[in-house]
Image (cartoon, coloured by chain):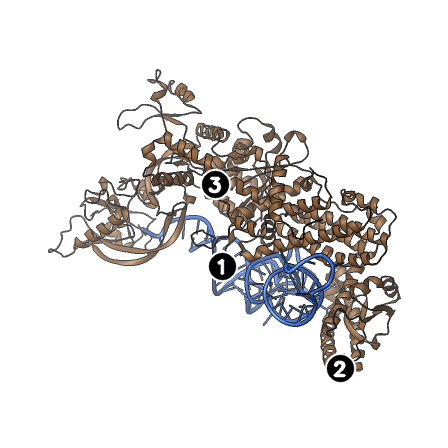
Amino acid sequence: MMDKRYDAKASEAKWYPFWEKNGFFGADPKAGGRPYSIVIPPPNVTGILHMGHALNQTIQDILVRWHRMKGDNTLWIPGTDHAGIATQNVVEKALKKEGRRRQDLGREKFLERVWEWKRQYGGTIVHQQRKLGNSTDWSRERFTFDEGCSRAVTKVFCDLYREGLVYKGNYIVNWCPRCGTALANDEVEHEPNRGGFWYIRYPVAGSAKGVAGEPYKDYVMVATTRPETLPGDTAVAVNPKDGRYAHLAGKTVVLPLSGREIPVVTDDYVDREFGTGIVKITPAHDPNDFLVGKRHGLEEINVMNGDGTMNALAGAKYEGMDRFKCREAIVADLEAGGFLDHVEEIENQVGHCYRCHETVESRLSRQWFVKMKPLAEPAVAAVKSGEVRFVPERWSKIYFNWMENIQDWCISRQLWWGHRIPAYYLPAAEGEEPRFVVAESREAALEEARKIPGFENLQADGLAQDEDVLDTWFSSWLWPFSTMGWPEKTDDLDFYYPTADLVTAQDIIFFWVARMMMAGIHFMKKPPFRNIVIHGIVRAADGSKMSKSKGNSLDPLELIDAYSADALRFSIALITSLECDTKVNKEKFEIGRNFATKIWNAARFMQMNAEKTEGFSFADLADDGALARVLEGAALSDDDRHLLIAADRAAAAVDGCLEKYRIQDGALAVYGFFWTQICDWYVEYAKDAFNGGDAARSRTVLSVLAAVYWRALRLLHPYMPFVTEEIAHQLGYLAEGESIMRAPFPRASTDAEKAAWNLTGDVFDYVEAKREMVTAGRALRAEYRIPPAQAVRFEIAAADEAAAARMAADADSLKSALRAESVSVSAGAEDRAMPGTLVRLGTIYMPLDGLVDKAAELKRVTGELEKARGFLKGVRAKLANEAFTAHAPAEIVENQRAREKELAAQIEKLERLAKLFA
RNA sequence: GGGCAAUUAGCUCAGUUGGUUAGAGCACUACCUUGACAUGGUAGGGGUCACUGGUUCGAGUCCAGUAUUGCCCACCA
């Protein structure tokens, strides 16, 4: 016997290892069939499971389990990302507690330490993912820094270099002083910042200073938010069209504090309206100034160290000072020197490191880049042609927009934890830029280097490998094929590449999705996936981003603990639309828990009755054709047929929704089918059958219920894997060792079955209408406060003789559904009793002598009458409109005609009733 | 500054190509501790679909504009 309560924890602890150990998540490319594959967006190895993962992976697992049940050869590859900066930070923090820095250990020892950390803690998120129920093939688990992925990275770098798509360049990069590394543009987050806007006088060269303490007589006014970079200024610029400053062109000005003379240049970049219309140009510390400097051949003076302190070029006084301290010092000195005119407050956008949130510095340095334009073009074409599709489609616009304005990708990072750049430098004289070769290994590099005249006898240790590592995304962009064994030729690549769907959030379309497209097309000659499914972000109840520091985040593991993994999955699927972000609070997850309880109890109900039914076995219904055998010769009621039709429709609905990635609608379809159709209606109907004392009938009803339940259970399995597996075994649909995850997705009734069981739309509509009558009858009871225990007599005035006959034959089910003493059906004769709601088949009545306030009833009837007349008027107007009858589809016009008749009849009845109460 | 979304019941959201009287969950009201389930049942209340125009026989749905909110991108020093 099933327990009174579903024990989710026990079930989860039992079934996940069962699936995994039996290899049910595994995939075999040799097994043939239609391939369906997904690669998981690899979470950071330092990560812990958050709601974003829960949403993202639930969607994927639903798709994967659905495809698997449909018989596709299905593979979902899991893995983690080595996450350069994040991981290095974690280990450095640990070192700091020991009072050491990574430099104290040296590169090799430090990396050993990181690997040690990875071995010890890197499995955290991988274990947490199992809690969600993900059916990932763990035998294929990959790590972006594992041997295979690293080989792929090195090959890709070398190939791109040989193709001229990787180059080393002088460039102004975003620099995080805390992380000590360059950041890609996308890794910088801009935030509004209120800060000073200092107006500074730059004296025109040769203009004498007035009497002591007086300002220079002749000066230009420059406004800046970054006074600390002043020592790096190598020009000031004005707009060439700015008449106010035309006279300055070609002159030089004196840089305050240093006395260095710098030119005045004209450049379109300068906005005449902003500030004073004069800009100081600091090519080494601002990306725009860098470009201006290039255009005008200006010197680039780097006044800062990598850690955000000032260097010797800033001047002896400021050397070693933190950049923000230096700002204060320089402002003070400017003021003392009479250079500072005034200061305003201004709001501008300041870049922050996406990892550590430190204010990002623009810094001139030597970095490695990937030329993106040639790679982007085919990636754009693939989406334009429809070969790759965004779901929802609108994301393609954002993708195009970014791709068309793409900048070269700075791929070098000044870290230790990551794929080291396979560039090897040859010995060079002091001050000379060394030559380098790029090769897959030191050996290959040596061979290459020896071909260079003068280096024929070079030894391996004479080559110095580049100190930098590659951006983490440089390995992630290969993920769809590096995980399948590339650059080796593998069966997995043959069969499973390209993957079918990529499921991810909108925030990494640029970081990751676009780049995977480029790499996939470039190296595999095929885009890495056919559909890019973009879902929203999980937000806190107030719409803000979830973050640990705000304390507004929900922990999926806590939700699993409180409500079960199934509840988490189902709830999140039900409340998430691909169209927009999802706001969640803890209470929303009760939906899933309550649903699991509901189906559990329905199962208990069936089991209870199965025990009373001799020879009944759920196993007999395990395959979809079984019901036909079990029901051989049995008579089906309209309600039985209705349920079978509803089951067909539910299966089609869920299938259709998932086909279109409408995860939410699929959840709603299976939810409504289970709860409303099976539990609310059919289980209640079945109770009456079981109590009816007809053994054959009871067996038929139980068989229909059990067969349909089994279909519903399988429909639900992709959403709620654990409870469905548990019930399947508890009831005995499955033998030990089998799994619902390998059971076929439910099919619709075959034509033969439909014919044998008379499953027609007509039957369906009849039962729906009958239920409306039941609802109307119950409403009458409620309205007149007749307790459920009190038996009443219902009379039904059917629309016509045919309807009367059909309902009379079915009166027993009406009687029990209404808990009525008796139900009588006849055509017409409605004046003798109190009316219920009008429905398609007729009117339901309940004699209510003595229970009625005639005045109140009259008021109600009058109200309904008014309403009906209003509707009729509208319908008649519509039908009188020739344009409507000419243009509208025939079906719509027919509906209106039918409605007109219905309303007219209704009004006639109501009028008679009004007389009755008058 | 540019772009993209959103605005439907008290709350969170569906509403797929325009087509009967706009739906769900939660919350709310009344009744029901009835033998699967109170994590439940039955019935009910609640919406001029942000606003203004337009197209159409017909608009929550399409178009234009306005307002509000959110997100993304961007070099305003």
Which amino acid type is shown beneath numbered disc 1? Asp
The residue that label 1 is drawn on is: A542
For this orientation, the residue located farthest to the bottom is A918
Give the residue type that dot 3 points to: Asn
Q: Earlier in the sequence, mark 1 or mark 2?
A: 1
Q: Quadrant of residue A345?
A: bottom left
Category of crowding for the residue at label 2, using alpha-carbon neighbours closer than 10 angstroms: few (below 14), some (14–19), many (at least 20) = some
How far apart marks 3 and 1 lie (CA) works out to 27 Å
Locate residue A22, reporting x and y percent: 64, 35
- Say which element carries label 3: loop
From the top left corner, tell me how far across and down residue A294 is, in percent.
32, 40
Chain at tag 3: A
Crowdedness of circle 3 by 10 Å Cα count: few (<14), some, many (20+)? many
Element carrying mark 2: helix
The residue beneath circle 2 is A854
Name the amino acid, label 2: Lys
- Look at 81% across and 58% down and name the residue there: A691
Q: Work out whether A296 lies above or below A821.
A: above
Q: Distance between the residues labelled 3 and 2?
A: 72 Å
Left or right: A404 as drawn, with respect to A606: left
Which comes before the other along the chain, label 3 or label 2? 3
Marked residue nearer the N-terminal end (3 or 1): 3
